[in-house]
């Protein structure tokens, strides 16, 4: 998992929810702490208008391995969940 | 008064002689008296009629060539009052030295008749006391006061080289600038006689300075004739200096073997590296969530090639946010489709992969080319590259 910056997939969903079209995903550069999107050629371009507030309000959440999420949702003891996660993660 | 031509006819009288006072006494006595008297001045003339008196002056300046006839033995003392010429004649008017005499006022002479109109000048005394003539080669230097011979008494060009001492003529005796080339001996002007830094190039014959007269390491770059920027100096087949023409950019100097000047040429085959560029991450960590190819920040470089192959290499760390995520990396030449793609799938969240991608674009044209490293992820995931952990180089190599 990234140790820096926004959760891009989360932010992309937040932008879409806010009505901002993101056609080619997002990019992030830590040195300038800026988020951008891409044009059709894959060149970085500024986010569309209306993105600023969404970006400012973005609260990145840790990305959870979907397999872990399934184990966490299982009706088994926590000791068994740990054993199952160890089988996946090692 | 009796004439000097009158015969004196002195004789001892006899007891029976009678004496005629006029004839026998007065006339002889007059004759004798003349020998002790000064006659009237006589004007100079070609022929002088001498008076009875033994002494007279000659005036005027007319040339005199003869005296009137008198008995042999008659002498006449003469004083000249002017400048006139006495013309020598060895018989009739014999003068001392055998040469004509030009008189001056006060000069005196004694003439003696030799009869028949012939006269001999017994002596001639100049009023100045000077000698009428000095015998040739008879005056020794003792006769001169030390230092008395002035310049006027030395004939022009009379002082010969033999009369000048060795090493005695100082430069003050030469007129400034008077010593011309003819008076300088060949090779006489030594280096010591030439001032420092005074010989200008005009004194050298064109092309006369040979190699032996140029010091080692004396020809500086500034002394070389200007040439064309980028040319090199070589020697041609005749051994003469020549230039290697400016080659094309990025061409290399290539030997053409013995007897031929080198030339700039495109580097021959063999995969030789012709150019190289290198870039590294400088924007810190980067992320992307794009599921189609996009530029990897900072991983772009440009080369102006001369035609050949372009080899691109990318090394970077890629973190996959989620398990099962695929990531794809490829190069893009001049915004064309990606080439050299590789892909990997993450086994778990945050799994880091250090990847190296190498790809060769073959036979690219001679032009400026831009190569991008690009990446993308599978849907619903994102990729990271922490810090600046990405490097890219681009090399042009010979085909």
Image: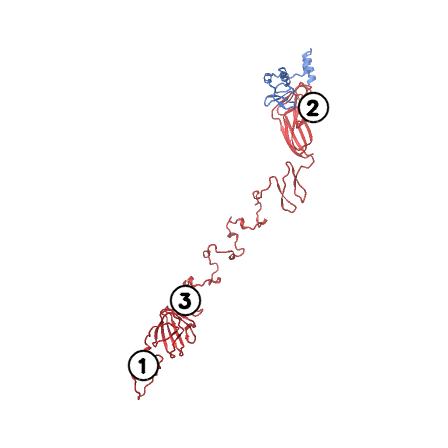
- What is the quadrant of residue B270 in the picture? top right
> What's the CA distance linking mark 1 and mark 3?
53 Å
> What's the CA distance linking mark 2 and mark 3?
136 Å
> What's the CA distance linking mark 1 and mark 2?
183 Å
Q: Is residue B32 left or right of residue B161?
A: left
Query: Which lettered chain is shown in blue?
Result: A
The subunit carrying tag 3 is B
Q: Which residue is mark 1?
A: B27
Farthest residue toward the bottom? B16
The subunit carrying tag 2 is B
Which class describes the residues within 10 Å of circle 2: few (<14), some (14-19), or many (20+)? few
Determine the residue positioned at 69% across, 23% down.
B343
Quarter in which the C terminus of chain B is drawn: top right
Question: Disc 1 or disc 3, which is closer to the eye?
Answer: 1
Quarter in which the N terminus of chain B is drawn: bottom left
Question: Disc 1 or disc 2, which is closer to the eye?
Answer: 1
Q: Considering only order in the chain, which callout, 3 or 2, is on the residue closer to the N terminus?
A: 3
Q: Is residue B262 above or below residue B82?
A: above
- Kindly state the secondary structure of the residue where label 2 is placed: strand
Labels 1 and 3 within one chain: yes
Question: Residue B235, image x and y in percent?
Answer: 63, 45
Farthest residue toward the left? B21
Q: Is residue B276 above or below residue B349?
A: below
Question: Residue A29, image x and y in percent?
Answer: 61, 22
Question: Residue B103, image x and y in percent?
Answer: 38, 70
Q: Colour of chain B?
A: red
Total numbered badges shown on the rendered structure: 3
Q: Considering only order in the chain, which callout, 2 or 1, is on the residue closer to the N terminus?
A: 1
Which class describes the residues within 10 Å of circle 1: few (<14), some (14-19), or many (20+)? some
Which class describes the residues within 10 Å of circle 3: few (<14), some (14-19), or many (20+)? few
Q: Which residue is mark 3?
A: B143
Q: Which residue is mark 2?
A: B343
């Amino acid at each position: 998992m990234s140790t820096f910056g926004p959760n891009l997939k989360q932010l992309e969903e937040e932008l879409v929810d806010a009505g901002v079209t993101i056609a080619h995903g997002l990019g992030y550069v830590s040195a300038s702490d800026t988020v951008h999107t891409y044009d059709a050629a894959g060149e970085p371009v500024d986010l569309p208008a209306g993105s600023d507030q969404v970006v400012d309000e973005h609260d990145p959440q840790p990305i959870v391995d979907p397999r872990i999420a399934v184990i966490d949702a299982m009706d088994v003891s926590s000791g068994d969940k740990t054993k199952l996660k160890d089988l996946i993660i090692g | 008064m009796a004439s000097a031509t009158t015969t004196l006819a002195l004789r001892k009288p006899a007891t029976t002689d009678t004496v005629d006072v006029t004839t026998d006494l007065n006339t002889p006595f007059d004759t004798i008296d003349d020998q002790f008297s000064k006659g009237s001045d006589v004007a100079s003339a070609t022929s002088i009629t001498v008076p009875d008196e033994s002494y007279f002056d000659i005036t005027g300046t007319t040339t005199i060539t003869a005296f009137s006839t008198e008995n042999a033995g008659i002498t006449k003392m003469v004083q000249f009052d002017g400048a006139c010429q006495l013309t020598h004649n060895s018989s009739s008017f014999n003068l001392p030295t055998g040469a004509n005499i030009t008189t001056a006022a006060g000069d005196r002479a004694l003439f003696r008749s030799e009869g028949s109109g012939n006269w001999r000048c017994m002596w001639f005394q100049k009023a100045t006391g000077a000698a009428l003539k000095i015998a040739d080669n008879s005056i020794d230097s003792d006769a001169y006061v030390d230092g008395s011979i002035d310049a006027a008494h030395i004939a022009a060009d009379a002082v010969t080289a033999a009369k000048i001492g060795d090493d005695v003529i100082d430069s003050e005796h030469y007129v400034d600038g008077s010593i011309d080339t003819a008076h300088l001996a060949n090779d006489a002007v030594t280096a010591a006689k030439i001032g420092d830094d005074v010989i200008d190039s005009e004194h050298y014959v064109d092309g006369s300075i040979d190699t032996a007269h140029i010091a080692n390491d004396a020809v500086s770059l500034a002394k070389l004739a200007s040439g064309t920027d980028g040319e090199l100096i070589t020697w041609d087949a005749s051994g003469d200096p020549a230039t290697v023409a400016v080659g094309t950019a990025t061409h290399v100097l290539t030997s053409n073997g013995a007897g031929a000047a080198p030339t700039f040429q495109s580097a021959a085959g063999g995969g030789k590296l012709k150019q190289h560029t290198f870039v590294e991450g400088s924007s810190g960590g980067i992320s992307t969530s794009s599921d189609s190819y996009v530029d990897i920040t900072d991983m772009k470089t440009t080369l102006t090639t001369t035609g050949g192959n372009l080899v691109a290499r990318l090394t970077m760390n890629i973190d996959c946010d989620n398990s099962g995520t695929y990531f794809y990396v490829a190069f893009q030449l001049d915004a064309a489709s990606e080439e050299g793609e590789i892909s990997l799938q993450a086994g778990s969240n945050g799994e880091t992969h250090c990847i190296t991608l190498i790809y060769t674009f073959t036979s690219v044209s001679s032009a400026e080319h831009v190569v991008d490293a690009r990446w993308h992820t599978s849907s619903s995931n994102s990729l990271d590259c922490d810090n600046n952990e990405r490097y890219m180089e681009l090399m042009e190599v010979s085909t």
